[in-house]
Amino acid sequence: MRVWLPTVLLAALLGGLSVGMSVLEPLFAWVQPDTSRVIYERESFAFLLYNHLMLVVVSAVIGTIAAVAGGIFATRPAGRDFLPLVSQIASIGQTFPPVAVLALAVPVLGFGEAPILLALILYGLLPILRNTLAGLEGIDPAVREAALGMGMSPLQVLLRVELPLAGKVILAGIRTSVTINIATAAIGSTIGARTLGDPVIAGLVNGNTAYVLQGAILIGLLALTADSLFEALERNWDRHSGRVRPPVFR
């Protein structure tokens, strides 16, 4: 239970501020004394947090499925020759800055959530793919051979031996991808997506430091909460999924 305590506390603080940012109005009034409105009110912070989180979650799910599938394919005998190509395709997402992806996607997809969702998927692929490849390639070949020798099919070896052994490494890649994309999603506000970047953009445009701080605080807390969650998941991986022991002959 103590492993989850930091995550619970951070999530509670994040949720509390998203609905009760006004309690900090005296602090923001001190930061921005020359402005009558110091609390961002164009959209509720709870709504912006929900939209922001959904963009990150959806992009993480799609990116994880694509990257793990690509990593599995590239580490199978039939896909070994495609390993460099798979890596290069995933690298494209981080070769171009997210702003450039948005500039190319907006004319095709229009304004709103779709362009930033595409950018997040592309930008989050590489860390997950790299860790999937590292996790699967790092498994001792003798473990696979022993599992096959015990009568397991290649699919059973993948699902019951390889993925559980590589799971913590893959999870670390997802953790990196999600944490990066929580910050990256904020730029979606520049093309009409409703995210926690809204108060940041509004503050920069209007010269209101209080708005910028409110958006930045919530984005930072969201990133810390997600990182704490993945840290707890990594610590509990063995205990909750069961330790995978290399098969041996007796």
Image (cartoon, grey):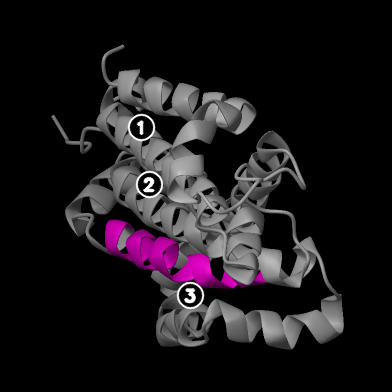
Q: Residue at x 44, y 37 (%)?
A: 27
Distance (Cα) linking label 2 and label 3: 25 Å
Q: Is residue 231 above or below residue 189?
A: above
Instruction: From the viewer's side, name the closer residue of 88 and 228.
Output: 228
* Residue 121 visible in this rendered orientation of the protein: no
Say what secondary structure mark 3 lies in. helix
Q: Residue at x 57, y 66 (%)?
A: 207
Residue identifier under label 3: 78
Q: Position of residue 61 (x, y in %)?
A: 60, 50
Instruction: From the viewer's side, name the closer residue of 2 and 162.
Output: 2
Circles 2 and 3, Cβ within 8 Å, touching? The answer is: no
Q: Position of residue 184 (x, y in %)?
A: 52, 64
Identity of the residue furthest to the left in this view = 250
Circles 1 and 2, Cβ within 8 Å, touching? The answer is: yes
* Residue 72 visible in this rendered orientation of the protein: yes
Q: Is residue 29 above or below residue 80?
A: above
Residue identifier under label 1: 233
Q: Earlier in the sequence, mark 2 or mark 3?
A: 3
User: Could you tell me the amino acid type at mark 1?
Assistant: Leu
Distance (Cα) linking label 3 and label 1: 33 Å
> What residue range appears in magenta?
118-135
Identity of the residue furthest to the front in this view = 34
Q: Is residue 2 above or below residue 36?
A: above
Say what secondary structure mark 2 lies in. helix
Residue identifier under label 2: 171
User: Could you tell me the amino acid type at mark 3?
Assistant: Ala
Q: Is residue 239 above or below residue 212?
A: above
Distance (Cα) linking label 1 and label 2: 8 Å
Q: Quadrant of residue 120?
A: bottom right
User: Could you tell me the amino acid type at mark 2?
Assistant: Leu
**Mark 2 residue crowding within 10 angstroms, few (<14) / some (14–19) / many (20+):** many
